[in-house]
Amino acid sequence: MQSILSSITSIVKNKFLLAIIGFSVWMLFFDRNDIPSQLERFQKLKELKTNTAYYEQKIEAAKAELEKRKNDPTAYERIAREKYYMKKDNEDIFLFDQ
């Protein structure tokens, strides 16, 4: 029992070991870049990468739609009629709820 107690007191008296333990605890739990903050940032990064993939797909779809419109001369008229409800002077528009 005495030898265990003396070994514990010698460890506690070792200032280098205490400094290393204190530094480790500080860096792991109290620093600005501690473990919980790093985990939270990793989750946010995964979410942002998912959003990036989603928006890249949207961009590709928009580019394909733009190319389709450039090649079709009647596309502008069709889009104006469908999306913006524009009409010619001698036409009537009827809107139906679906």
Image (spheres, rainbow, N blue to C red):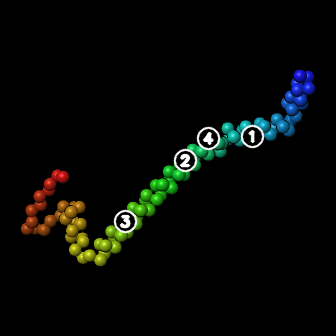
Residue topped by disc 4: 36
Residue at 13%, 68% in the rendered image: 88
Say what secondary structure mark 4 lies in.
Answer: helix
Circle 2/circle 4 CB separation < 8 Å: no
Residues packed near mark 1 inside 10 Å, few (<14), some (14 to 19) or many (20 plus)? few
- The outermost residue toward the left is 90
Amino acid bearing label 4: Pro
Residues packed near mark 2 inside 10 Å, few (<14), some (14 to 19) or many (20 plus)? few
Residue at 43%, 58% in the rendered image: 54
Q: How many marks?
A: 4
Amino acid bearing label 2: Gln
- Image spot of residue 73 (x, y percent): 24, 76
Q: Which mark is residue 59?
A: none
Residue at 31%, 75% in the rendered image: 70
How far apart marks 2 and 4 lie (CA) works out to 11 Å
Q: Which mark is residue 43?
A: 2
Viewer-proximal residue among 93 and 13 = 13
Amino acid bearing label 1: Ser
Residue topped by disc 1: 24
Position of residue 97 relative to residue 93, above or below, is above
Residue topped by disc 3: 61
